[in-house]
Image: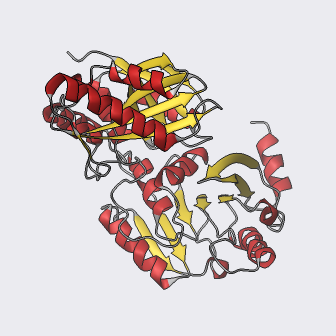
Amino acid sequence: MNANFEMVAKTLYGFEELLEKELLQLGAQKIKRGVRHVRFIGDKGFMYKCNLGLRTAIKILKPIAKFSVKNETELYQKIKNIRWEDYLNKDGSLAVGATLSGDRFTHSQFIALKTKDAIVDRFREHTGQRPNVDLRFPDLKINIHIEGDFCNVSLDSSGESLHKRGYKIATNIAPINEVLAAGLVMLSGWDGQTDFMDPMCGSGTILVEAAMIACNIPPNLMRNEFAFERWQDWDVDLFEKIEESLLSKTRDFHHKILGFDKSPSAVRKAIENVKNAHLEEFISIKHEDFFKTQKGGDAPLHMVFNPPYGERLDLEMEEFYGAIGTTLKHNYSGTNAWLITSNLEALKHVGLRPSRKIKVFNAKLESKLVLYTMYSGSKKIHKIKRQKPD
């Protein structure tokens, strides 16, 4: 039986609670939420499950050492004392990444270099051979995190960021990150029980993530590789059992997911990505200008979209965001419309009062995810109906 150990799931700012809930649903133990990360306990199979099944994680790290460190010399020696031969063959390859906070250490590349030197020197002294550095496809990817004078040494089980799902083969300018897209859909509270729309869908990322959430499809099934597949204890049979277990929990979806974009090239790319994700059954994409559309039928509609902020498109901000408000108000009654923007000034021109605002980050841009509730009939009548006793 595999032993349990501590792991750290990294995420985007504002998604910590979502990630905590995901881990709880997967079966993690001793969950502890932090800033941009969640700590938890599990075994090797659970590590595989987290990499395959977590929508809001960007890395799954396995800590192997922690210690205080005052200078580069002490760091070198303490790294060298770790039994790296338990994790890497002498003729294997490694890569080191470092993140630093505080005033004591300020040069991440130098810290990564000192770590690499310590590991290589240990192998050379013990075996007469040394592992190679391979920044693209290493057998072991090592993460150093120093905060103040405290150092955490971890193995990166994921490799490339988990937002790289594997389905996106065509992109537009500044496409939305897959983890961000999944988190926005989850924050919006969509549960797959209504129709869903992205009226400015770009390359289709929000649509694909919404479909995978609706069908409970593991988000990282299409990844080419995880870093743990190169580890000495890689267990392909266990991995395939975990994969089958997750696939057995997929569910039916009986509503529509619709995407619009007025750019023909964006529509082509979105269709290509949806096809690559094998989700054509659930997602329809049309070449439409949102401002010239209207909601079909009276059924509730859930909308999540990422309109241009101004950085990516030459547009008249006031007119563009005003048109969003006008279109929602007149053409989309019975809709919960969520949009994300880093252009907080633009929100003033929508002309609608948000029902909710959630602070998130799009890359390094502080943004707001806002909800506009478009009632069927007037808001006043809607409130009276809600308050009417049974």
- Position in image of residue 329 (x %, y %): 76, 68
Specify the quadrant of the image occupied by residue 96. top left
Q: Is residue 256 left or right of residue 381?
A: left
Most foreground residue, 262 or 136: 136
Q: In screen coordinates, is 360 left or right of 146?
A: right
The correct choice, above or below, for 153 with respect to 360 in the image is above
Picture quadrant of residue 140 = top left
Q: Is residue 335 visible?
A: no
| Nearer to the camera, 298 or 194 | 194
Picture quarter with the N terminus: top left
Query: Between residues 370 and 89, which one lies in front from this camera angle?
Result: 89
Q: Is residue 275 left or right of residue 182?
A: left
Residue 67: tell me if it is visible.
Answer: yes
**Could you tell me which residue is drawn at 59 percent across and 54 percent down?**
363
Q: Quadrant of residue 241?
A: top left
Query: From the image, which quarter does the C terminus lie in?
Result: top right
Residue drawn at the location 47% of the way across and 54% of the way down: 178
Expressed as whole percent of the image width and height from the top left, the position of residue 155 reads 35, 31
Q: Can you give x and y, in whole percent of width and height, for residue 325 in the image?
A: 76, 69
Q: Position of residue 108 (x, y in %)?
A: 51, 41
Kindly identify the residue that appears in the image at 39 percent across and 62 percent down: 282
